[in-house]
Image: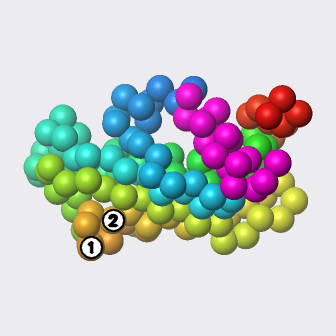
């Protein structure tokens, strides 16, 4: 199986079971081995008391991109720890884009950086450490 096909099939299997991200309207824009781009529109119900996108939802978007990127090898991978720094607000009515890229993958551990954008403005930087656990997302022998 080609690496790109494996990444796409892994993302499809992972996201099919991700009710939380689906409920927020998070969608996959692109996936490749060690990379994912996801988007989410900032609807009124995602706003906090300041009238900007709640930081927890920005984190969830970044975490979802991280999850898709680190699971792109058809191996089950979970977050070991992560941190986010907010740089600017996500504004009502805009579409946020999170881009996750693999920094390191050695053995069962990985490190990924995720940038979250509101148009041309970077609004957050997220760093996630991953840990491979047992299992696969799909049987590669079946296609």
Is 11 one of the magenta-colored residues?
A: yes
Residue at the (70%, 49%) spot, across then down: 5
At x 44% / y 67%, what residue is drawn? Answer: 115
Q: Main secondary structure of the magenta part?
A: helix
Give SS at disc 2.
strand
Which mark identifies residue 56?
Answer: none
Residue beneath label 2, please? 117
Q: State if disc 1 and disc 2 touch (CB < 8 Å).
A: yes
Give percent across and percent down for residue 74.
76, 43
Can you say whether 101 is above or below 82 in the image? below
Residue 86 vs 5, above or below: the answer is below
- Which quadrant of the figure has residue 103? bottom right
How many badges with numbers are in the image? 2
Relative horizontal placement of residue 141, taking residue 97 as reference (left or right): right
Per the image, the residue denoted by label 1 is 120
Occupied quadrant, residue 24: top left
Q: In front: 11, or 76?
A: 11
Q: State the image quarter where residue 138 is shown.
A: top right
Residue numbers of the magenta segment: 1-16
* Residue 82, horizontal then vertical, whole percent: 56, 56
């Amino acid at each position: 199986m080609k690496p790109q096909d494996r990444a796409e099939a892994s993302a499809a299997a992972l996201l099919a079971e991700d009710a939380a991200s689906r409920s927020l309207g998070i969608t996959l824009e692109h996936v490749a081995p060690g990379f994912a781009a996801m988007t989410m529109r900032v609807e009124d119900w995602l706003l906090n008391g300041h009238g900007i996108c709640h930081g927890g939802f920005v984190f969830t978007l970044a975490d979802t991109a991280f999850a898709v990127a680190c699971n792109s090898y058809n191996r089950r991978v979970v977050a070991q720890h992560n941190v986010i720094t907010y740089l600017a607000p996500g504004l009502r009515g805009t579409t946020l884009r999170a881009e996750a890229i693999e920094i390191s993958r050695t053995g069962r551990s990985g490190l990924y950086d995720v940038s979250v954008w509101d148009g041309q403005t970077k609004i957050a930087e997220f760093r996630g450490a991953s840990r491979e656990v047992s299992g696969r997302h799909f049987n590669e022998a079946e296609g």
